[in-house]
Image: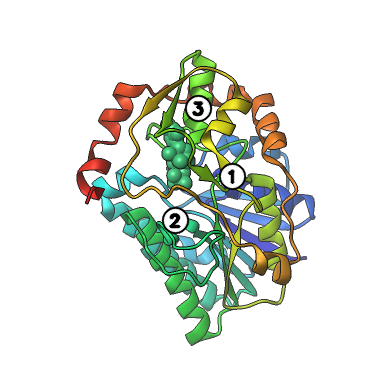
């Protein structure tokens, strides 16, 4: 029987991967320090004998390494993910996203795992020259979160090259869906807008809302990770997107409600759009959930965002001060 280990398995994307692995009948070990992940993301699996959940920091090598014994597949999803805190406090971002990745690599090497899939981030492309953007585009991280995730990816590829560790990185584009983070930090647009919808407050649209994002539904992303683990590919980097790119105005139209505008932030691309040629050819994977369907699924579960902070123009202005301070030309 295949044994899988998911770092960050109580998090947004990790917990959806865990669901698929358990559905496949695999034994699953989750390592999570619950810094942004939540045990409730897996509470529907609590009677599952094939799942074991451990509160561990991934950058604590002595504690995390023994869990890799006998593991076949490793999904390394644990990371710190917000932009502004990464500018204000880069140290923890380095510890989790770089040192933590190094620990995962060394534990994987020691226990001769069969496959390691890294949670790559499309934020490494910054503001790219070309859309759709392919994996060979220049690396242009705009802030420490993007930088640390990319350094982590370089470590992963290097361990593949030097130690012949069977590694892959999937660079994800704007993943959204149920269980997306609701922590205190100003973050991804879906969490912000859903909390505003529940509170009957206007959506804070950045700029004029014509910027577009490659919104990719989380269960499609989780399926891509499974395909990557099942494949024979090694030492490769593959974009994972939705196949399209959608404006914030379109998102507002689907969510329905009033809007209010906030200034465009420096370093933000006007578009994110994955070139999916490699994903299609190498993984034989296609996203299945359209934006309309994805938003529908989220609205069915909107109560999840009841506890999420409700942002307004003033609190966003305060929360993004350092963004403007450090990233402006
Ligand atoms: N966005 C917005 N209002 C918000 C937060 C975000 O209009 O309160 C927009 C933002 O300008 C961007 C898109 O939503 O165009 C996605 O933002 P997010 O932070 O989720 O992802 P990223 O910009 O890192 O791709």
CB of mark 3 near ligand 1 (< 8 Å)? yes
| Mark 3 or mark 1, earlier in chain | 3
Find the residue positioned furthest to the top. Answer: 200
Q: Nearer the viewer, residue 310 or 270?
A: 270
Q: Which residue is mark 1?
A: 215
Q: What residue is shown at x 46% (from left), y 79% (from top)? A: 158
Q: What residue is shown at x 66% (from left), y 67% (from top)? A: 277
The Cα atoms of the two marked residues, 3 and 2, are separated by: 21 Å
| Mark 3 or mark 2, earlier in chain | 2
**Going by the image, does 317 lie left or right of 305?**
left
CB of mark 2 near ligand 1 (< 8 Å)? yes
Look at the numbered discs 3 and 1 and tell me whether their residues touch, using CB distance below 8 Å: no
Q: What residue is shown at x 60% (from left), y 77% (from top)? A: 166
The Cα atoms of the two marked residues, 3 and 1, are separated by: 14 Å
Q: Nearer the viewer, residue 173 or 310?
A: 173
Tag count: 3
**Circle 3 SS class:** helix
Q: Which residue is mark 3?
A: 193
Observer able to see residue 59: no
Q: How crowded is the residue under tag 1: few (<14 C-alpha within 10 Å), some, or many (20+)?
A: many
Observer able to see residue 217: yes
Q: Which residue is mark 2?
A: 123
Q: Quadrant of residue 146?
A: bottom left
**Position in image of residue 281 (x %, y %):** 72, 70
**Position in image of residue 308 (x %, y %):** 47, 26
**Position in image of residue 184 (x %, y %):** 38, 31
């Amino acid at each position: 029987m295949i044994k899988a280990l998911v770092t960050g398995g109580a998090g947004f994307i990790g917990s959806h991967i865990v669901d698929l692995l358990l559905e496949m009948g695999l034994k699953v070990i989750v390592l999570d320090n619950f810094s942004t992940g939540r045990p409730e993301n897996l509470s529907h699996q609590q009677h599952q004998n094939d799942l074991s959940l451990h509160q561990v920091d991934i950058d604590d090598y002595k504690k995390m390494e023994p869990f890799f014994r006998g593991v076949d597949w490793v999904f390394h999803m644990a990371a710190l993910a917000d932009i502004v805190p990464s500018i204000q406090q880069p140290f923890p971002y380095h510890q989790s996203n770089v040192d933590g990745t190094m620990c995962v690599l060394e534990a994987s090497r020691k226990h001769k795992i069969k496959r390691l899939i890294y949670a790559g981030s499309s934020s490494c492309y910054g503001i790219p020259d070309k859309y759709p953007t392919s994996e060979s585009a220049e690396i242009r991280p705009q802030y420490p979160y993007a930088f640390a995730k990319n350094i982590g990816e370089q470590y992963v590829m290097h361990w593949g090259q030097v130690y012949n560790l069977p590694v892959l990185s999937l660079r994800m584009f704007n993943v959204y869906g149920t269980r997306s983070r609701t922590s205190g930090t100003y973050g991804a647009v879906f969490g912000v807008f859903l909390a505003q919808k529940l509170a009957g407050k206007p959506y804070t649209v950045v700029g004029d809302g014509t910027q577009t994002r490659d919104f990719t539904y989380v269960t499609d992303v989780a399926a891509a990770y499974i395909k990557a683990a099942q494949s024979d590919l090694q030492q490769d980097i593959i974009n994972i997107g939705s196949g399209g790119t959608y404006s914030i105005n379109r998102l507002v139209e689907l969510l329905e409600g009033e809007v209010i505008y906030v200034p465009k932030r420096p370093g933000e691309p006007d578009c994110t759009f994955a070139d999916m040629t490699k994903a299609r050819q190498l993984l034989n994977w296609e996203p299945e959930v359209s934006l309309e369907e994805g938003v529908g699924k989220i609205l069915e579960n909107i109560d999840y965002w009841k506890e999420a902070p409700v942002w307004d123009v003033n609190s966003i202005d305060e929360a993004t001060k350092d963004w403007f301070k450090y990233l402006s030309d």
